[in-house]
Image (tube, rainbow, N blue to C red):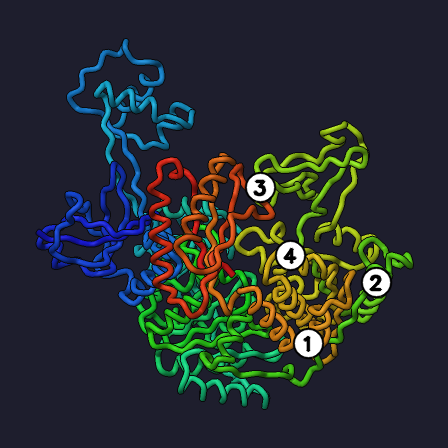
Amino acid sequence: MFFVEVVLPLSLTKTLTYRVSEAEFYFIKKGMRVAVPIKSKIYTALVLDVHENAPTLYEAKEIHQILDEKPIATETQIKHWLWIANYYMCGIGDVYRGAFPSGLLLESETIISHKIDAIVNQNELTDEEFLIYEALQQQSSLKVQEIISILNKKNIFPILQKLMAKDIIVLEEEIKENYKPKLIRYVKLHSKYESDSGLNELLEVLKNANKQKEIVLAYFQITASEKKPITVKKLVEASNSTSAVVKALIEKEIFEEYYLQHNRVAFEGRASEKQLLLSAAQETAFAEIKNIFLEKEVCLLHGVTSSGKTEIYIKLIEEYLKTGRQVLYLLPEIALTTQLVSRLRLHFGDKVAVFHSKYSNNERVEVWKQTLENSDKAQIVIGARSALFLPFNDLGLLIVDEEHEQTFKQTDPAPRYHARDSAIVLANLHSAKVLLGSATPSIETYFNTQIEKFGLVTITERYNNVRMPEVLLVDLKDKHFRKRMTGHFSDLLIEEIAEALSLGEQVILFQNRRGYSPIIECLTCGHVPHCQQCDVSLTFHKHKNQLRCHYCGYSIAKPTHCHSCSSIDLTTKGFGTEQIEQELVSLFPKAKTGRMDQDTTRGKFGFEKIIDTFKNREIDILVGTQMLAKGLDFDNVSLVGIMNADNMLHHPDFRAFERSFQMMTQVAGRAGRSEKQGKVVIQTYNPNHNTIQQVTNNNYLGMYKEQLYDRQIYKYPPYFRIIKLTLKHRDFDKLKEGSMWMYKVLSQNLNMPVLGPEEPAINRIRNEYIRTILIKIPQNLPLAGTKKTIQKMLNSFEAVPQYRTIKLAVNVDFY
């Protein structure tokens, strides 16, 4: 008996065992995909192991078919997945589903066919059943989608059940491959017209067909100038004609058509020959990093904003490419990849591949295959956190840029991994080096450099000795009192914007809220419209004239009167990016304004369009949310305005001060990146707040020491590891009871602080109530052992019948 151990793309913690024949046993390798049946569906499973031990608890089924000729995942990659599943306490199936591009996960499609020897009494069938029966007389089988369109209703399964009960139809599963290579249509002249006499004959044939003659002449012009195959698209463009005319020529057998496979993710262009010249400070840092890499695996590059960290990365990548090893460059935000890819492609040409979620399925499959084959096109892979899961053969260097960014942490769905920490483990498996880069490192990383676990290299000056921006604080209390505010702009900020615009410079305004205003309130009774499914007020979006919930997407039209007392006195409270954009139009009618937030960057090239128009100076003032704070590089920005620094500081979160410092410093760093010193205006009600003072003086160490002191007292990372359990259920009382049970079991069995069960600030999302429990694990206790104990308690929670319906999510290191 021969068996394979497989993992399925379902939220399962264990692998499953399937039976294979002897021939299959010797053919299958670890990392191949096989199609396996489970209940009545078929899934794409990945082989983790082949062995000869039968499972004890169940009878092993046979696999359906083998889908690959050679492994599509590497052994190192699978080891890394197992580590993620173990460390972040989730199922290995979750990791597999999250890691694989869905183009490689075949879904089975249910096919309905007619039972051959069925005896049917047509009078017994209902109208809908008869329609299906009739359709099956016309063709041998139907797909579910086709039946839905025949009956014009979504829920067709009850009808199918009845037909199966009457023994008229049978269901079969068919597997379909989602990935299709991209084929491009080319044309060439038919062989009989290639000689000189053939050409005269051709002109004779086309004597009266002018449009067709134009296309043929255009064809000859293109072949004369270029010696490569001609696509239909190019021919149609060159001759200002339509593809219908080309089709007519193909039917007349004047042209022949043929198809060639084409790479979707191709880069046109050559690498530039120019050498990168580093400044003295960059040279020193570069040499120090190389020295640290001789002894340590991980190094932190702490360079102030605009100190030229990217050039150092490029130099390092050059060195690693000479050794023929692959490089992975992780970025926190898709918006950043667009700017960086163009910089790296100028330097390395088509050795750069990009991998992130805005790419289509087919494009991601192609990058996956290129990485697996170690092809030249994927020597350097740039991507957001999911690029971590690609099948690298020989990884030499990992760069995690802006390592402090919270977007490196996946929140939902599982695996809830942190890309920075997982990258360090991946590097360890490949014995590669990791370079973390940031102007405002996270406290945990900086702490690791202080206890000498990581190396540290610091750059304190900006590139070309440009001075750090000058920070001006505006006290909003005082300005309101003296009536010096116009809308949400203080007189100082308006003056500064006017001055920058008069000099032809650009301005960035930062407000970390999208929409027009977060609250609409009735002045008569104080009623605020809330989302029906979540416990949040609805945000007003003016350009769509609707109120939206930012948690579940529920929306209603803007009310004309109060829903509670029918008064028409409604007012908006608070402000978002839309409102600022509108105020700018009345304050600076001549300036062009743009907005960058989740509403304006939908679609694959949403970011690129806005970033490019701003870089080409078509927009004077750009208003945006935190997307702007990530390492974007604009050389003409001389002024940055932070509209309200307080709403970040007063977040109910132990990282609020650290995050505010990082966010403000990063936004401030967008100012004055070329010759002239930039300015930053911070509007706040509390100018003497420590964190705001630390931003003003660019005092990272002061912030680090103060936060570290607090965290030691209140038992937070880096001194304690935190595991957060989130419980959700629609029934308030059942959730309360279940979370209390969980809390008691945990606090009795763990000798460490367990906090909860707590209602979060937003305690209901999508009609589910939420409770959270925090477990704080001190550094001196073994982490793995504690997790095993916690896992046992979670398993016993699952075993209690009345709590089985409560959803429980485990988030390890949720910060």
Q: Amino acid at mark 1?
A: Asn
Q: Which residue is mark 2?
A: 494
Circles 1 and 3 in contact, beta carbons < 8 Å: no
Spatial distance from mark 1 to mark 4, Cα to Cα?
Answer: 22 Å
- The quarter holding residue 441 reads bottom right
Instruction: Between residue 63 and residue 594, name the one nearer to us.
Output: 63
Q: Which residue is mark 1?
A: 698
Q: Which residue is mark 4?
A: 651
Using the image, determine if residue 96 lies above or below residue 529: below
In the shown orientation, is residue 62 left or right of residue 599?
left
- The secondary element bearing badge 2 is classed as helix
Residue at the spot 69% in from the left edge and 72% down from the top edge: 695
Instruction: Between residue 660 and residue 491, name the one nearer to us.
Output: 660
Spatial distance from mark 1 to mark 3, Cα to Cα?
Answer: 39 Å
**Position of residue 89 measured from the top left corner of the image (x, y, whole percent):** 38, 56
Using the image, determine if residue 100 lies above or below residue 682: above
